[in-house]
Image (spheres, rainbow, N blue to C red):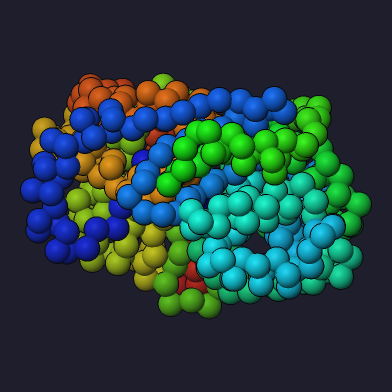
Amino acid sequence: MDFHPETRSQKLPPLFLIYGIALWTVLLWLTPAWAGHIAIERWTTRNGITLLLVERHSLPMVQVEVLLKAGSVFDPEDKAGLANLTAELLAEGTSSRSATQIAEEIDFIGASLSASADLDYTTVSLRVLKKDINAGFDLLSDILTHPTFAPEEVERNRELVLGGLMAEKDEPGIVAGKVFDKLLFGAHPYHRPVEGLEETVPRIQRGDITAFHKDYYRPNNTIMAIVGDTKKEEVQELVKKYLGAWGMGKIPSLQIPTPPKPTAPKLEIIDKDLTQANILLGHLGIERANPDFYALVVMNYILGGGGFSSRLLTVIRENQGLAYSVQSGYDARYYPGSFTVSLQTKNATANTAIHEVLTQMQQIRSTPVADQELDEAKSYLMGSFPLRMDTNAKMARLLSHVEYFKLGLDYFDHYPRYIQAVTKADILRVAKKYLDPERFILVAVARQKEAKIKLNR
């Protein structure tokens, strides 16, 4: 998942720790005024594309982020990986260009053009010089609306995906994550990896890909965020010229089953001959639209999302030397995602580390956080907010997500204010409500003979 930077753990280098508070204070002072002056144009084209534009004329560059509501949640269960394969094939040939021609034209104008699928959506990104904006939009519109999904390219990309799935079997963290998601989400489509499974990817046929593209790659299913050296009038002409003929369509509805609610802790051990145990512990989290999102961001920063300043890292790494890194995070998506704590520790100390994680989860649910912890968390989260939009690419990505999650264009004003408004009582309330150290899933990839991981705490 490439969004939700508010929910991710922050790995802060030591020098940043030394000078961080001063920097955060300066950024905090600047943030409200800076963020409030973001001028965003928003409109909808006749064929249903939602357009968002932020003009930045300091560099002769334009960034385009196209978000299509065509993620892997829409994959049929027996053909998981369909959205991913569709996205991978967009630039592998169109009705007027071969894959080689597309690559050569992109290189010739010094642009970048890429596509990738996620659980909830697919994104297509274009970066181009202002002088080549017409050529860039020509290529972008071509791969969006006229991909051919040539049989030989389907097979080649299928083999690449399968090769990647095979390679992931040697990555303990990925193995643990896949098992965790399967146990956590049950029949909910979030239990499937975006890239699919070894048994489902071979079932995907070219007809499935063309049908998926026809169903979901529609202008009325599309958000387009543009940031850079351009103006609304120019964007309107470009979109009309290159995407005006893109036909609207009825988007298939989706029935999402509810993830199961565990009544007790559940343990899954993947026994491997490793010197370190890879541990993933957690439970169901929240959807991005949850009004408690901001309080949870602050709470998680204090618990395990704040890098070297978090409780988990302080206790488990600094005080007890049990792990080099430990972090927690909420994966807040369109539907409720996961809350996880991940760590790597020696097999022999796995149970001790797990016990400390649960202890810290329980403690933040039962005792108010310290004033200093709260102040430092809010200062960092507010002070670093401008860094999430300091490039055209970051800003375009954030704009598309603000629209997708219906956060409102006043999000840029409200985010710092919402963070600032979080109190110690809020932290305690959301920790009690959304952290559950009694009902969780624990997945460990470890040498179990040595680790002897168990649930009794």
Q: Nearer the viewer, residue 107 or 30?
A: 107
Q: Quadrant of residue 372?
A: top left
Write the residue at 25% across / 25% down.
Answer: 417
Q: Quadrant of residue 318?
A: bottom left
Residue 200 makes an appearance in the image: no
Write the residue at 77% across / 47% down.
Answer: 145
Instruction: Classify 179 as above or below 239.
Output: below
Write the residue at 33% across / 32% down.
Answer: 38
Q: Nearer the viewer, residue 326 or 297?
A: 297
Write the residue at 37% across / 30% down.
Answer: 39
Q: Nearer the viewer, residue 144 or 271?
A: 144
Instruction: Classify 85 as above or below 415.
Output: below
Residue 23 makes an appearance in the image: yes
Measured as percent of width and height from the top left, residue 442 is found at 50, 51
- Count the marks: how many? 0
Measured as percent of width and height from the top left, residue 182 is found at 64, 48
Q: Quadrant of residue 33?
A: top left
Measured as percent of width and height from the top left, residue 436 is found at 42, 34
Is 333 left or right of 426, judged from the image as shown?
right
Instruction: Classify 93 as above or below 384.
Output: below
Instruction: Classify 290 as above or below 61.
Output: above
Measured as percent of width and height from the top left, residue 297 is found at 33, 36
